[in-house]
Image: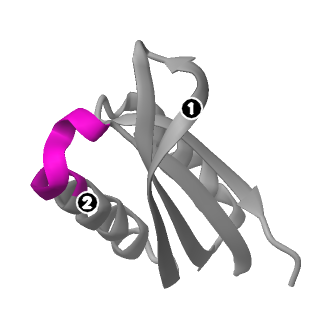
Amino acid sequence: MRPYEMMVIIDPDLGEDGIAKKIQEIREWIEQDGAVLESIEEWGHRKFAYPIKKKDEGYYAIFYFKAEPAFSLTLRRKVELDSGILRGMIVRRDE
C-alpha cells in the first residue's frame, strides 16, 4: 500500500450539515474499498483566487490515506462525478 493525500473543495451551498455529511461520505468511500484512512485535516472556508463553477469560496478538506495504486483511479472518478465537490486532487506522498 502506498501513502496518498487527497484535497477536495466542497460546495459551501451545502451548509454545515451538508458539508459534514459530504466529509463522512468521502470517508466511507475510502474505507469501504480497502484503503486505510490515516487522518482528515479540515481547513474550512476559503476564498478562491478566481471563480470555480460560479462560486467565490469553498470548504477545503484534506484526506490522508494508504491504498493500492489502482484505488486512486476509482476514488478520482467518484470525486469527479459528485456534484457537491467543486474540485479534487489526489497525489502520492513520499514514504
Q: Nearer the viewer, residue 14 or 3?
A: 14
Residue 38 pos. (x, y %): 53, 87
- 62 is within the stretch colored magenta: no
User: Mark 1 falls on what kind of element?
Assistant: strand
Q: Is residue 90 left or right of residue 41?
A: right
In this view, which residue lies farthest toward the top? 54
User: Could you classify mark 1 by the number of other residues whose Cα lies within 10 Å: few (under 14), some (14-19), or many (20 or more)?
Assistant: few
Magenta span: chief secondary structure: helix
Q: Which mark is residue 25?
A: 2
Q: CA distance from mark 1 to mark 2?
A: 24 Å
- 13 is within the stretch colored magenta: yes
Residue 13 pos. (x, y %): 21, 33
| Badge 1 amino acid | Phe
| Badge 2 amino acid | Glu
Query: Which residue does the numbered mark 1 point to in the structure image?
Result: 48
User: Could you classify mark 2 by the number of other residues whose Cα lies within 10 Å: few (under 14), some (14-19), or many (20 or more)?
Assistant: few
Q: Which residues are magenta?
A: 12-19
In this view, which residue lies farthest toward the right? 94
Residue 53 pos. (x, y %): 43, 15
Q: Quadrant of the N terminus?
A: bottom right
Say which residue appears at 38% left-offset and 75% top-offset: 31
Q: Is residue 28 left or right of residue 90?
A: left
Image height of 12 relative to 6, above or below? above
